[in-house]
Amino acid sequence: MQMPTPLSPLKIGTRGSPLALAQANETRDRLATAFDLPFESFSIVVIKTTGDRIIDRPLKEIGGKGLFTREIEDALLSGAIDIAVHSMKDMPVDQPGGLVLDTYLPREDPRDAFISLTGGALADLPQGAQVGTSSLRRKSQLLHRRPDLTIVEFRGNVQTRLAKLADGVAAATFLAMAGLNRLGADDVPRAPIPEGQMLPAVAQGAIGIERRGDDTATAEMLSAIHDADTGTRLAAERAYLAALDGSCETPIAGLAELTGTTLRLRGEILRTDGSECLADEVTGPASDGADLGRALARGLLSRAGEGFFDWKAA
């Protein structure tokens, strides 16, 4: 296998947010450690995606899948970068022809975090409080459990969201615990939300590394940092998501957990206005994860009926 050198560094493609850069740096660090290489053997290439460029509109209005991945994948296909590092919850279930996604780093805490400058937890919000989020999943889950709340559009990085809270735009917002942990953002007031109260997005907390399918040298290199347990969990979650034909425009939650060789997969689908939530879970051998994911999706869809995901204003 040909190793990258300072003269021909391995080009790592990523979005430019602080979290995306932290994830790209973690990938570089793990590769450097695995092969005893200096950091100069790697080059981090920042690529702006559609989702990064359009920040004044809700994601559902931009439309389509791959809002945070398409431009990065184009660069990978063209050879401008060698690998792409993604937040797996942003990844469509299908990759463009010629690309492979089969390397995952150890998963971080998958839970959502309740963020409020006044502290407390989700249950402490007063009647009619304004809550900021751009996630259709979180919005639907909130309205299902607390229909009295008012949801306002909230996008941006950690500091942008904290500034909005300070300006009184909303009383609270949400971030992923994984992102806060990876950023070392210990100063951000947060309360982890138990999965039983708010099931997270599919693949939340996981980092995936994408490569060209014919790049066998890079495939061999990436295999050294692949976390098999994360791969097993995501195989189930992403099969479930694929069977639901899910995207950023559909409120879907799911989480797989491993206990030895047994996998438990919980799933939840909601109407966009939060008026109905369907939930279920399956358990079985971890080796059957993808089949379990598809079975869970089929069961939920059979209960949902036609038009369940049709857009309805809250």
Image (cartoon, rainbow, N blue to C red):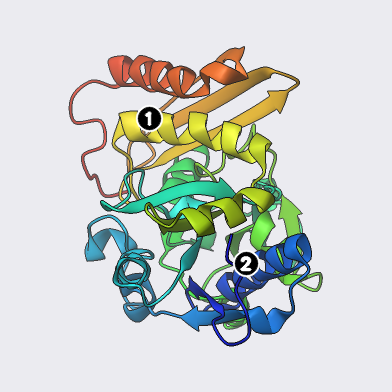
Type of the residue with mark 1: Glu
Image position of 126 with respect to 195: above or below = below
Looking at the picture, how far across and down is residue 287, in whole percent?
Answer: 57, 19
Q: In the image, 41: left or right of 306?
A: right
Looking at the picture, how far across and down is residue 40, in whole percent?
Answer: 67, 84
Callout 2–callout 1 Cβ contact below 8 Å: no
Q: Which of marks 2 and 1 is in front?
A: 2
- Residue at figure coordinates x 58%, y 38% from the top left: 231
Image position of 257 with respect to 20: above or below = above
Looking at the picture, how far across and down is residue 82, in whole percent?
Answer: 46, 69
Looking at the picture, how far across and down is residue 201, in whole percent?
Answer: 51, 44
Query: Label 1: few (<14), some or many (≥20) within 10 Å?
Result: some
Q: In the image, 174: left or right of 182?
A: left
- Residue at figure coordinates x 29%, y 72% from the top left: 78
Query: Label 2: few (<14), some or many (≥20) within 10 Å?
Result: many
User: Taking the image as drawn, is residue 236 in sight?
Assistant: yes
Q: Name the residue under label 2.
A: 23
Of 267 and 290, nearer the camera is 290
Type of the residue with mark 2: Gln
User: Taking the image as drawn, is residue 87 in sight?
Assistant: no
Of 289 and 173, nearer the camera is 289
Of 131 and 242, nearer the camera is 242
Q: Is mark 1 on a helix, strand or loop?
A: loop
The residue at the far left in this view is 306
Marks 2 and 1 sit apart, C-alpha to C-alpha, by: 35 Å
Q: Is mark 2 on a helix, strand or loop?
A: helix
Q: In the image, 163: left or right of 134?
A: right
Q: Which numbered disc flags the more N-terminal residue, 2 or 1?
A: 2
| Mark identifier at residue 276 | 1
| Mark identifier at residue 79 | none
The residue at the far top in this view is 284
The N terminus lies in quadrant: bottom right
